[in-house]
Structure formats: C-alpha cells, structure tokens
Amino acid sequence: MQATQLRIEQVSTRRHRADFYRVKRELYRNDPNAIVTLRRLEWLQLDAAKHPFYKHAIREIWVAYQDGKPVGRIAAFVDHLHNEYYNERTGCFGFFEAPNDPKIARQLLDTAVDWLRKSGCDQVRGPMNPSMKSEFGVLLEGHDYPPFIMMAH
C-alpha cells in the first residue's frame, strides 16, 4: 500500500484560488441537496480589497492537496472590531470543507489555528463564512433534505 502525500498550501495564485472553489464542488458533486455558492459571490466574501468586512478584519486561506489533487480547504479570520468591542482575542475559521478523512480535517484545522495564534488570538470559533452575519455552523444531520437559505451543508 502506497502512502499518500498531504500538503496544505496558502492560496496565493490563480490556480490555488480555482482549486479552493473546486474542492466544494468535487466533494458534493453527487449530493442532490448540496448548494454550491456561485464562484463570484464566494470570492466576494473572501476579497480583502472589496468586501467591507476586511476594513476591520484580516484573513488567510488554504487548500489541502493529496497526491497533487485539491481535497480540502479552510480560511481563518481575525475580526479586530469584534475583538475590540468584546475585549477578546478571538479568531474564526470558515469555508471549511474536507472529505470524511480525519487526517485531512485535522491538518486543515491545525493550519488555521496556528495562523490565528500567530495573529494574536487565544480563542477560536467556527465555522463562519466569514462572520456570524453570513453562513455559519456545520450540518451534522439532515443531509437528506434540501437546505434553507444560509444553511451550512
């Protein structure tokens, strides 16, 4: 049995960005109840130059690759306005997608948590895409039913 190589890469190129979107589409391509956000709308939520959230927040984005194929993704956020108001040092993660593989999920989460720690956070919340004013949470049961608006899948 051949060992598979898993690596996490920061989204820094157009290819990374395309792979970031491809992950969710590939994971749920056979799921009739999954709703995949339009690429342009999803990127707007992550566009630090255009989205008003990033006037008071920072973010980083990663893609997990297994044997060169994109298989997972995650983003991490620090909302400075939230932390100032609530006197916290909290960071969040979101846009989290991974196959049913604990190793991939753990490495993605560890990457986000490490970045949040380096960014001064001592608490982590999530998933939020990118904040509680957008899609948040994880669907644990009910995959057999069509989703509601802003419902995680």
Image (tube, rainbow, N blue to C red):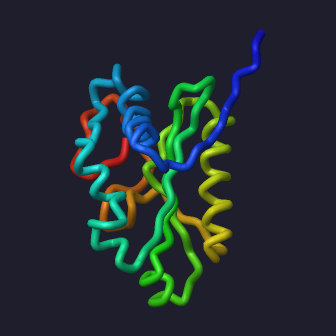
Estimate the x, y position of residue 53 in percent, counting from the top left: 33, 72
Quadrant position of residue 31: top left
Position of 39 with respect to 91 (left or right) is left
Q: Is residue 145 above or below residue 109?
A: above
Viewer-closest of 64 and 32? 64
Estimate the x, y position of residue 7 in percent, counting from the top left: 65, 37
- Residue at image position (45%, 90%) is 85
Estimate the x, y position of residue 102 in percent, counting from the top left: 65, 36
Is the N terminus in the top left, top right, bottom left or bottom right quadrant?
A: top right
Is the C terminus in the top left, top right, bottom left or bottom right quadrant?
A: top left
* Number of numbered discs overlaid on the protein picture: 0
Toward the top, the furthest residue is 1
Estimate the x, y position of residue 40 in percent, counting from the top left: 23, 47
Quadrant position of residue 37: top left
Position of 68 with respect to 149 (left or right) is right
Viewer-closest of 69 and 73? 69
Viewer-closest of 151 and 44? 44
Position of 131 with respect to 107 (left or right) is left
- Residue at image position (67%, 52%) is 110
- Residue at image position (39%, 79%) is 56
Position of 83 with respect to 145 (left or right) is right
Toward the front, the furthest residue is 13
Q: Is residue 108 above or below residue 26?
A: below
- Residue at image position (61%, 28%) is 66
Quadrant position of residue 19: top left
Q: Is residue 60 above or below residue 109?
A: below
